[in-house]
């Protein structure tokens, strides 16, 4: 059976006042991207024909949406039914319509595909995703007819909303739906706001469809994470912990060793090659890319590229546009920013490399500094191949060091160094004999002239 690609609506117009934030709830960060992009990406990966985000008049989501994702505006805050109504002119009556929430981020592409397939094969007007929970407290219970279709959803927000028998039901509504486009378009104009909140609720469409003889189905999903919505920062932290675990599992199944997944922070857009090891207390952020057979120890990497066989850390900080080429090494307490570190090059420890280009198989000593900022502008340092830098060397940019050159320990290099040369850029040492004794006499003049003897009178 050929299933028509769905239109996916993502409801994201809520203000999320319980977040206590000036940032709209769905734009809060979740593992490196705004929360709303999780269901957006899932919908795109599921093969949606159109993805439409329904936003408030402030259009806060517009700036973060990928190319091709549409924005519809809900003119007033009148509930989930009003949000879907705001996108009604984008709905294809001949295609399935999936409705997701921007604050329920852990929905997967696989779950969307399964829900759409289940809907298509059942021939019903609408299908809701449900889950069977050990503790269904607080969720709407799904009451089924004898034929297995959904008779109704019983809310349990207040005492008396449900009977004792209904409270025993463990199948609950996830709030994720798929409709036949024509059925949804027929029901939307008939929604009413006859409720305590005076809003239009999308679940009422199910009652309207059943009243006219249509069937409503339910598809049970195994992943309880689909149920988790974010209403406050506590819930966001809980969802983030699950998201981090899912990201780590994805990498481990792809051949990455993560020694302790609970102690690492890996954001969603990070790429890691097989047979790379990530040790505890490591943070990998942004669009960081790490090749295969690398080792990252207790380090912080942001928007950088690490090629195959590289060793990083412990306690290294790779900032945006750091590029470590194959087999390079960045050691303890090394910071690299906007620099290209050549293949096999070593920067062992206690160094800052910023705005620099370093050739292959160079070795920079401890305490190497590229002084890249003159107070007005940034300048680049160019260090050639097979350069041997002495400890405590500072390169004052702009400066170029040729291939096979050396620098003496303690040098401040302000001029270009020719290939193969040794740069000695430090004051000549002079030893002052007796300096220690002189300092002692100056500090204690009374002892020096003998005036500290006892009074004999």
Image (cartoon, helix red, strand yellow):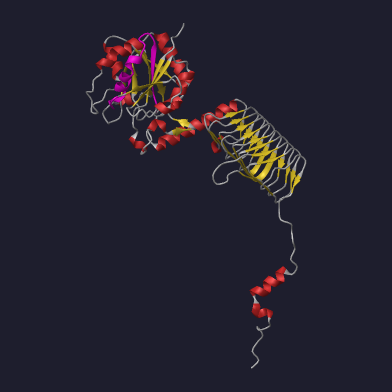
Can residue 222 be spotted in the picture?
A: no
Residue 129 lies left or right of residue 344; in this view the side is left
* Front-lying residue, 369 or 426: 426
Query: Is 97 one of the magenta-colored residues?
Result: yes
Image vertical order of residue 431 relative to residue 172, above or below? below
Residue furthest left as drawn: 194
Q: In which quarter of the image is residue 422?
A: top right
* Front-lying residue, 61 or 44: 61
The image position of residue 136, as x and y in percent, is: 38, 28
The image position of residue 236, as x and y in percent, is: 42, 34
**Residue beneath the point at 33% across and 10% down:** 182
Q: Quadrant of the C terminus?
A: bottom right
**Residue beneath the point at 35% across and 39% down:** 20
Can residue 157 be spotted in the picture?
A: yes
Please give the range of residues in magenta. 75-102
Residue furthest right as drawn: 420
Counting labels gives: 0
Image vertical order of residue 265 relative to residue 59, above or below? below
The image position of residue 49, as x and y in percent, is: 44, 14
The image position of residue 253, as x and y in percent, is: 59, 26
Residue furthest top as drawn: 1
Residue 224 lies left or right of residue 364; in this view the side is left
Q: In which quarter of the image is residue 141?
A: top left
Image vertical order of residue 144 relative to residue 230, above or below? above
Residue furthest bottom as drawn: 457
Query: Is 340 one of the magenta-colored residues?
Result: no
* Front-lying residue, 345 or 224: 345
């Amino acid at each position: 059976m050929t299933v028509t690609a769905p239109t996916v609506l993502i409801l994201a117009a809520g203000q999320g006042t319980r977040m206590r934030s000036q940032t709209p709830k769905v734009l809060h960060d979740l593992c490196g991207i705004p929360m709303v992009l999780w269901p957006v990406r899932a919908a795109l990966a599921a093969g949606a024909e159109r993805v439409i985000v329904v936003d408030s008049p402030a259009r806060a989501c517009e700036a973060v949406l990928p190319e091709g994702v549409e924005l519809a505006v809900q003119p007033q805050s009148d509930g989930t039914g009003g949000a879907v109504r705001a996108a009604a002119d984008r709905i294809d009556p001949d295609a399935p319509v999936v409705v997701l929430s921007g604050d329920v981020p852990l929905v997967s592409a696989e779950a969307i595909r399964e829900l759409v397939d289940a809907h298509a094969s059942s021939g019903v007007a609408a299908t809701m995703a449900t889950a069977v929970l050990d503790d269904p407290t607080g969720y709407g219970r799904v009451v089924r007819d004898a034929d297995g279709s959904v008779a109704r959803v019983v809310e349990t927000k207040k005492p008396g909303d449900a009977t004792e028998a209904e409270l025993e039901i463990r199948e609950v509504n996830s709030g994720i739906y798929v409709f036949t486009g024509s059925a949804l378009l027929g029901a939307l104009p008939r929604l009413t706001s006859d409720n305590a909140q005076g809003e239009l609720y999308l679940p009422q469409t199910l009652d309207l469809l059943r009243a006219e003889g249509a069937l409503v189905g339910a598809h049970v999903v195994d992943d309880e994470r689909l149920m988790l919505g974010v209403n406050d920062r506590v819930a966001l932290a809980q969802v983030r912990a699950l998201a981090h675990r899912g990201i780590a599992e994805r990498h481990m199944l792809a051949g990455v060793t993560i020694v302790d997944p609970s102690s690492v922070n890996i954001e969603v857009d990070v790429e890691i090659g097989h047979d790379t090891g990530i040790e505890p207390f490591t943070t990998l952020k942004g669009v960081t890319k790490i090749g295969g057979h690398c080792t990252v120890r207790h380090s912080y990497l942001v928007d950088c590229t690490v090629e195959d066989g590289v060793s990083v850390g412990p306690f290294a900080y790779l900032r945006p546009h750091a590029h470590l080429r194959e087999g390079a090494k960045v050691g303890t307490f090394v910071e690299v920013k906007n620099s290209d570190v050549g293949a096999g090059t070593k920067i062992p420890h206690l160094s800052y490399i910023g705005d620099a280009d370093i050739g292959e198989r160079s070795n920079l000593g401890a305490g190497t500094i590229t002084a890249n900022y003159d107070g007005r502008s940034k300048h680049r340092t160019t260090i050639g191949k097979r350069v041997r830098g002495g400890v405590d060397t500072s390169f004052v940019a702009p400066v170029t060091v040729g291939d096979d050159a050396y620098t003496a320990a303690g040098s401040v290099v302000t001029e270009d160094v020719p290939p193969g040369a040794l740069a000695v850029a430090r004051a000549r040492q002079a030893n002052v004999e007796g300096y220690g004794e002189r300092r002692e006499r100056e500090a204690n003049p009374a002892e020096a002239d003998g005036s500290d003897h006892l009074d004999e009178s």
